[in-house]
Amino acid sequence: MPGLALLGLTALLGLTALLDHGEGATLCLSQQLRMQGDYVLGGLFPLGSAEGTGLGDRLQPNATVCTRFSSLGLLWALAVKMAVEEINNGSALLPGLHLGYDLFDTCSEPTVAMKPSLMFMAKAGSCNIAAYCNYTQYQPRVLAVIGPHSSELALVTGKFFSFFLVPQVSYGASTDRLSNREIFPSFFRTVPSDQVQVAAMVELLQELGWNWVAAVGSDDEYGRQGLSLFSGLANARGICIAHEGLVPLPPGSLRLGALRGLLRQVNQSSVQVVVLFSSAHAARTLFSYSIRCKLSPKVWVASEAWLTSDLVVTLPGMPGVGTVLGFLQQGAPMPEFPSYVRTRLALAADPAFCASLDAEQPGLEEHVVGPRCPQCDHVTLENLSAGLLHHQTFAAYAAVYGVAQALHNTLRCNASGCPRREPVRPWQLLENMYNVSFRARGLALQFDASGNVNVDYDLKLWVWQDPTPKLRTVGTFKGRLELWRSQMCWHTPGKQQPVSQCSRQCKEGQVRRVKGFHSCCYDCVDCKAGSYQRNPDDLLCTQCDQDQWSPDRSTRCFPRKPMFLAWGEPAVLLLLALLALALGLALAALGLFLWHSDSPLVQASGGPRACFGLACLGLVCLSVLLFPGQPGPASCLAQQPLFHLPLTGCLSTLFLQAAEIFVGSELPPSWAEKMRGHLRGPWAWLVVLLAMLAEAALCAWYLVAFPPEVVTDWRVLPTEALVHCHVHSWISFGLVHATNAMLAFLCFLGTFLVQSRPGRYNGARGLTFAMLAYFITWISFVPLFANVHVAYQPAVQMGAILLCALGILATFHLPKCYLLLQRPELNTPEFFLEDNARAQGSSWGQGRGESGQKQVTPDPVTSPQ
């Protein structure tokens, strides 16, 4: 406690002296960048920068002069100093041991950074690097290195320290190449890899609907690697890079011409968003030219390297560039740091304190590496105030705690001390750096297998408050983006969110047909019926499965419903009414014939054969009941046989009737009597049987050789699945009609030219019209059935069957029923039976020959043909 009180009093006196001296006071701040300890940490910080020091411009390997001071570099160095002092003054880490530090300026140049790097690898107690075959027992001056800040320098120093397996922890180098353990086995960092930042950028673009962007990077390792990562991930996520380019470092006239061309393209195109993955110097160069070229305001998605840089923020005209968004690494707050910086500045202004430093730390090797930081001895608190809360200050602070925890584990330290007393080599410390977990300011961190830490990001938005912008948090990225839209504001007319798309968003049910070289430039094409848009980014419509359907411009498919000739359809109801009519007439005629079975009319019509024919005609009508309803295997097989066999029975009885008429009118009487006896006797039933057996054989062949089957047709109807009986062979289907067609044709031939005698019933005419009705029905059926939609083919067959039955009834059977009911006086043997007619006919001839007066008045039903 007395020591702390003395230090506070000294700082107070120093602060008074600093205020008295003003800005011109010389400090000893650079002398505070080194402290002895049991284990020393090296440090590389951008305390200054040089201009025009590219390797191509150097003719001799002389010293590089750093002309520009970097306040942030000094603050990061002081954060490391603060962390070391906290560890030394505490007991949680390395109790009983003291860490030291040796902090140098890199001047943001690889050639400058290599000098202190060589000094770090010098043998302990000397300035020389010894050459050995085996460096296992080699003890360099430092145990580990903190820094450097930039990826460009880390790629150079990382390989150098990896050769000696010296742990190196960077607080700012984020290029993904440094995660390669084969090339950089001893590299660690307390900032995430650019891979994480790029993933966050791409997710931000997707969340805000921006798929048409320009991408610009600085022409250095950081910018090129970041631009490459962004391009690859953006293309994989459907984001198109309309224009891509690099900002030259240092700027040259030829390469700046290409930059002007890039800015001109961006300004003239529909691109409203520019992703700038760049160092702060390159970003300043780009914005200088964009302001000079009067680039229209854009949305700038910033990388972490320039989002908070004073080089960019203080550039005149920056408020006119548009909206700036970027991701910033989260860290634990360090409220004591500003006070610590003020204390160090106050002590640096105290001559007594500075004299004590000279006595404690002789030989600072300025003759080898040059002055550590001459500009640091002329800074003021005002110079440093802007960067006191910079986000990477915590990263530098945490780097020390990561090394200290690994050393604590290596020495097997506990609350009472560290049992292991032998010196620790860098490679031994490295073994405990892998996957080490540590805490800094209460925040739990861990180095993963690639040397990275698991740190989240905040999404920051520039909100302009003269003269510099304020960073507003508008979201977070913790593996997934969380956007706070209510906190966002846009520097656009109307304060509306900008739209950056090559083509408008397609509507639902439309896919993109790409035009040109970019997948984001496209025409919207409707998905036709039977296909749908599966995902919003699809380039082709997806066909529905065969059991599904979709309308035009659909985003999903719907299941098809089975469709068949249902019982309740209007067409079926109409046909059922027609069936009732036909069946009712057939049954009525059958009943009338049975009632008058002994009458001459029924006997002349065939007697029992006429009743059999009417019964078969009724079965023909009933066969239409097999067509409505959902088809099944049994109904498909039974449809044709159960229609054709009864029809054959009906037509065979009509054939016998026609044969009687033909024999009676065309053959000599002696032959006619003999033939009529056979046609009316038991042999007539043999003809009916033979005809039905022939038809049964044709039906059996049809069912065996070409059996119809139930088929579900998924494509013939737009929204339903048609279930129907499929006919395999239309030729076999036609041959099933052969027997009936032949019987009808023979009936027609036997009655077409027959002359009926006067006074006799004209049965030939009824048969002729019945066969005409048969032929007209089935001849019309063929083209109608072939051209009608397959869904309605069963209805066409039903209609043809019923019309055929009604035609036969109306032309042959119903006139006889009319005579039975309305003209019973004509139901006489003389009018219907051939034997009596012939005898009566001869007497009629004699009567006419004798008197010429006796005549029979013809009736409309009985008039000759």
Image (cartoon, rainbow, N blue to C red):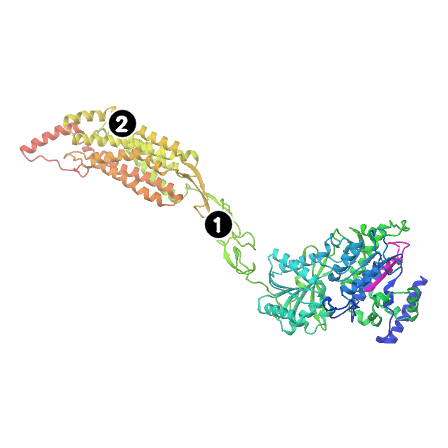
**Outermost residue, top direction?**
682
Q: Is residue 88 magenta?
A: yes
Q: CA distance from mark 1 to mark 2?
A: 57 Å
The mark total stands at 2
**Outermost residue, left direction?**
850
Residue 145 falls left or right of residue 819: right
Task: Say which residue label 2 marks.
Answer: 687
Q: Is residue 686 above or below residue 115?
A: above
Give the structural element (helix, strand or loop) at label 2. Answer: helix
Q: Quadrant of residue 374?
A: bottom right
| Amino acid type of the residue tagged 1 in the rendering | Gly
Residue 247: % across, % down? 66, 67
- Residue 444 in sight in this render: no
Residue 18: % across, % down? 87, 73
Disc number lying in front (1 or 2): 1
**Outermost residue, right direction?**
2
Image quadrant holding the C terminus, namely top left
Task: Say which residue label 1 marks.
Answer: 530
Q: Which one is in front, 190 or 795?
A: 190
Q: Is residue 39 above or below residue 340?
A: above
Q: Is residue 598 magenta?
A: no
What residue sits 81% from the left and 58% below the top? 145
Q: Is residue 848 above or below residue 50?
A: above
